[in-house]
Image (cartoon, rainbow, N blue to C red):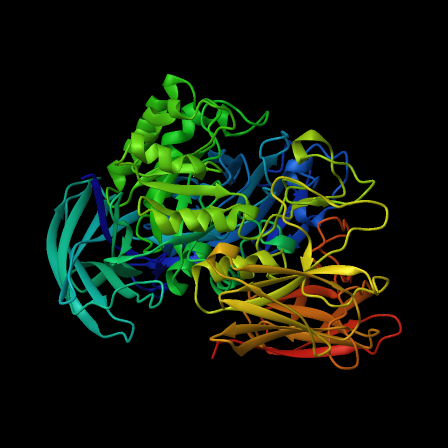
């Protein structure tokens, strides 16, 4: 029996304790470095110089994506792959003081992500270059700094060579930046690895490996002390060890601790502990790092599938790109958290970070909320998919970038698998097998606790030739090819299979295969949520519009992909309710209406599309004409009523794929679907015809946010009639205004053919809805958001900004 067992206890990204006082000889500090940057779009030959005059540059805080601020244009070099948004080269500069008493410390700067080709200058000198836009990186600034004086940092970001991505990348310093000030004797960046080699209900063995560095010229004796606390802050295990470090020595130290009666991390109860790792010398703390982590076991086998803490889990997965819709690539913590919240509420239990490492905030949210993750490194390897993509950097940078991903992310309990690539162009060549082994071994050398996969596909007949390539991985990733799984199992019975991408329309057939076979551990739909770029994937085509897939034509004004279960504002499409109903038990009946074909001809579907279907019984002009109503149900039968008149009853069991379709003549009023069980009517869902719009209805996802200059509130707008029923045909022009300590950062309506600016104070409604996102300033107080539209009464909503969340 082939069996792969992976057991690990893992952590959220560290929060290092704040600055010690200026008088202390030791200093431990990780400071947010997002504020007060200067930015200019365009090339400059001297912007790295200290004497450069940046007084006319724009002032801003990070994270920042300049592409989303621009207008998508049909002929932009970025093309449909990048949503037709502008790219180019940009410069960031910041002047900051460096206290004289820090002279004997080590000062580093840490970038969570810069897209792309980032070159960092300090006081006019180049510190380093990071080509791949998704790799986090750190530079030691100590040799370049003027202590007791002002210093200048400049960052050149070059996203001018197009095309370099098959999806929207964004441009700029789009993730957080941190300044780290630490003692010459300290814990190395990403230098703590936490695992649990033995876990029972009674006890968990926690193994913590810490890399300590002595960057002094003399031998040092230190104490490495580790304390584990539970969610209440109570210590549950502690240990310490005395270590001697030679001059300029780096040493890995292993500590084993036991946690009694561990609270395991799971999807339902994502319990987290905290490990406080402390370097002491005498009575001084030289370095203190606190990392949250979770204890859990993972196990994969063809016989039993995927087990989390010994329990079989079927992966109801979705692929996600890294953008945050109207915010572009900007990785605000709240935006990343909200995305995970929405996807978990939609029934997903796993996400694949297609096709790059995600933000740390995204993984932190998955840890905290209970979401499984496949963490993916690359879209391709040595052969390019676009002219300037990662292939040109692969040979020189692959090892650095893969190791950075695994070292940074290895302790997150949410991550259950590593992926080294996606639909590799050279996959049919024997050399690809060697590349796959090289990548997989690099991952395993750092983290042997999780399986390695990559996503493979072909649309021709040469599927079996991938057997050697799949054998180089622990789990075989199938893109759109799960129909091969049963015959593959006969040929290679030990193979563990996951469908790493699938068409939305195949939800039932894929779910059915997962139910039947333990060696198929799950399915990841393309995609969980709509995204920018890959413009037009998943679209439906009206008569007279250009037909074909995105790679066959310029489909502008489409500037995003409409294949998600959720749209870019977070609204769950009918396919989302259907997929969740297949995998979960928290929703048993749902109803939506298929958009009728226009009189001029039939709607056509593209490959990733499902029929445009809406939660609407408002179809003016269709009176008396048949309209198709879809009911998804886990009840054996459903009945459909129109204005209390029975229109029919149909079975909705497994044989019917839990669906029933009714064609009924349209008449305004109330449409009701009722689940039937044991010949009795049970649960029902209702759609009501909307009248003329009279109201603007506002609802914030949170009515209290933090006054830190980073927190967000998402305000959904619905245009309703006097009875509060959404009018899905309303397209009113909306204007947004905010007063108080907040600013508008983006507006949206989910219409990926609407090319109005996302950074604006106006937006047209689509399907009766829109959204405005406001960001706090660093002042507390009451925020008032006003939405107005011609011929409608203004609507306002109040949000409280506080210095500390309740």
Q: Is 791 drawn above or below residue 445 in the view shown?
A: below
173 lies left or right of 791: left
Question: Where's residue 278, x and y in %?
Answer: 22, 59
Which of the 4 image quarters holds residue 169? top right
Q: Is 733 drawn above or below residue 723 in the view shown?
A: above
Which of the 4 image quarters holds residue 534? top right
Image point (69%, 48%), residue name:
57
385 lies left or right of 689: left
**Residue 661 seen anywhere in this rendered image of the structure:** yes
Q: Toward the viewer: 122 or 334?
A: 334
Image point (49%, 55%), residue name:
655
Q: Toward the viewer: 243 or 373?
A: 373
Q: Toward the viewer: 804 or 71?
A: 71
Question: Where's residue 228, x and y in %?
Answer: 21, 65
Q: Toward the viewer: 313 or 554?
A: 313
Question: Where's residue 207, x and y in %?
Answer: 17, 54
């Amino acid at each position: 029996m082939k069996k792969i067992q992976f057991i690990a206890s893992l952590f959220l990204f560290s929060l290092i304790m704040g600055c010690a006082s200026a008088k202390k000889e030791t200093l431990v500090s990780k400071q947010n470095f997002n504020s007060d940057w200067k930015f200019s779009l365009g090339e400059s030959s001297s912007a790295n110089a200290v004497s450069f005059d940046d007084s006319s540059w724009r002032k801003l805080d990070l994270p920042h994506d300049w592409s989303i601020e621009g207008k998508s244009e049909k002929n932009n070099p970025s093309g449909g792959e990048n949503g037709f948004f502008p790219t180019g080269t940009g410069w960031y500069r910041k002047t900051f003081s460096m206290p004289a008493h820090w002279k004997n410390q080590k000062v580093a700067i840490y970038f969570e992500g810069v897209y792309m080709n980032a070159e960092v200058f300090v006081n006019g000198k180049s510190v380093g270059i990071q080509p791949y836009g998704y790799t986090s990186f750190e530079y030691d600034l100590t040799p370049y700094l003027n202590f007791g004086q002002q210093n200048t940092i400049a960052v050149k970001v070059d996203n001018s060579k197009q095309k370099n991505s098959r999806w929207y990348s964004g441009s700029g310093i789009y993730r957080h930046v941190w300044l780290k000030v630490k003692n010459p004797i300290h814990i190395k960046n990403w230098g703590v690895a936490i695992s649990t080699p033995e876990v029972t209900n009674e006890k968990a063995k926690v193994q913590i490996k810490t890399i300590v560095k002595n960057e002094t010229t003399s031998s040092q004796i230190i104490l490495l002390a580790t304390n584990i606390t539970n969610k209440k802050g109570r210590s549950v295990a502690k240990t310490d060890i005395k270590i001697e470090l030679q001059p300029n020595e780096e040493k890995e130290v292993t500590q084993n601790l036991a946690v009694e009666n561990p609270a395991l991390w799971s999807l339902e109860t994502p319990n987290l502990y905290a490990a406080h790792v402390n370097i002491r010398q005498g009575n001084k703390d030289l370095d203190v790092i606190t990392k949250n982590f979770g204890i859990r076991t993972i196990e994969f086998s063809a016989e039993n599938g995927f087990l989390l803490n010994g329990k079989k889990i079927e992966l109801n997965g979705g692929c996600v790109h890294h953008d945050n819709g109207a915010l572009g690539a900007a990785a605000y913590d709240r935006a990343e958290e909200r995305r995970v919240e929405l996807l978990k509420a939609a029934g997903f239990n796993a996400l694949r970070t297609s096709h790059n490492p995600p933000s740390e905030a995204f993984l932190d949210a998955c840890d905290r909320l209970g979401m499984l993750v496949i963490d993916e490194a690359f879209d391709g390897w040595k052969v390019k998919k676009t002219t300037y993509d990662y292939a040109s950097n692969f040979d020189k940078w692959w090892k650095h970038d893969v190791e950075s991903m695994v070292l940074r992310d290895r302790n997150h309990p949410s991550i259950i698998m590593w992926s080294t690539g996606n639909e590799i162009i050279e996959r049919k060549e024997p050399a690809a097998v060697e590349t796959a082994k090289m990548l997989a071994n690099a991952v395993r050398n750092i983290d042997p606790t999780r399986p390695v996969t990559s996503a493979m596909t072909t649309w021709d007949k040469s599927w079996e030739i991938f057997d050697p390539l799949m054998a180089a991985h622990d789990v075989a990733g199938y893109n759109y090819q799960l129909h091969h799984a049963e015959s593959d199992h006969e040929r290679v019975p030990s193979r563990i299979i996951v469908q790493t991408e699938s068409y939305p329309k195949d939800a039932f057939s894929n779910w059915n295969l997962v139910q039947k076979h333990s060696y198929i551990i799950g399915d990841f739909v393309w995609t969980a949520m709509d995204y920018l770029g890959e413009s037009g994937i998943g679209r439906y085509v009206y008569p007279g519009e250009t037909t074909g897939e995105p790679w066959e034509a310029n489909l502008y004004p489409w500037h995003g992909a409409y294949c998600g279960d959720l749209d870019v504002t977070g609204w769950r499409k009918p396919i989302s309710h259907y997929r969740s109903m297949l995998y979960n038990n928290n929703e048993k009946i749902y109803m939506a209406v298929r958009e009728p074909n226009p009189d001029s001809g039939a709607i056509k579907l593209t490959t990733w599309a499902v029929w445009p279907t809406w939660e609407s019984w408002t179809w003016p002009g269709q009176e008396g004409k048949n309209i198709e109503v879809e009911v998804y149900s886990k009840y054996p039968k459903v009945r459909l009523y129109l204005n209390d008149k029975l229109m029919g009853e149909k079975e909705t069991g497994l044989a019917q794929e839990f669906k029933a379709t009714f064609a009924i003549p349209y008449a305004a009023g109330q449409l009701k679907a009722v689940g039937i069980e044991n010949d009795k009517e049970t649960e029902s869902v209702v759609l009501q015809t909307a009248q003329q719009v009279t109201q603007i209805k506002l609802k914030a996802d949170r009515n209290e946010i933090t006054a830190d200059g980073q927190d967000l509130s998402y305000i959904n707008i619905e245009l309703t009639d006097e009875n509060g029923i959404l009018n899905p045909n309303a397209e009113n022009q909306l204007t947004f205004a905010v007063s108080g300590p907040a600013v508008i950062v983006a507006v949206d309506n989910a219409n990926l053919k609407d090319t109005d600016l996302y950074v604006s104070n106006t937006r047209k409604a689509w399907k009766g809805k829109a959204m405005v996102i406001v960001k706090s300033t660093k002042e507390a107080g009451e925020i008032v958001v006003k939405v107005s539209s011609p011929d409608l009464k203004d609507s306002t909503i109040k949000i409280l900004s506080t210095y500390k969340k309740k």
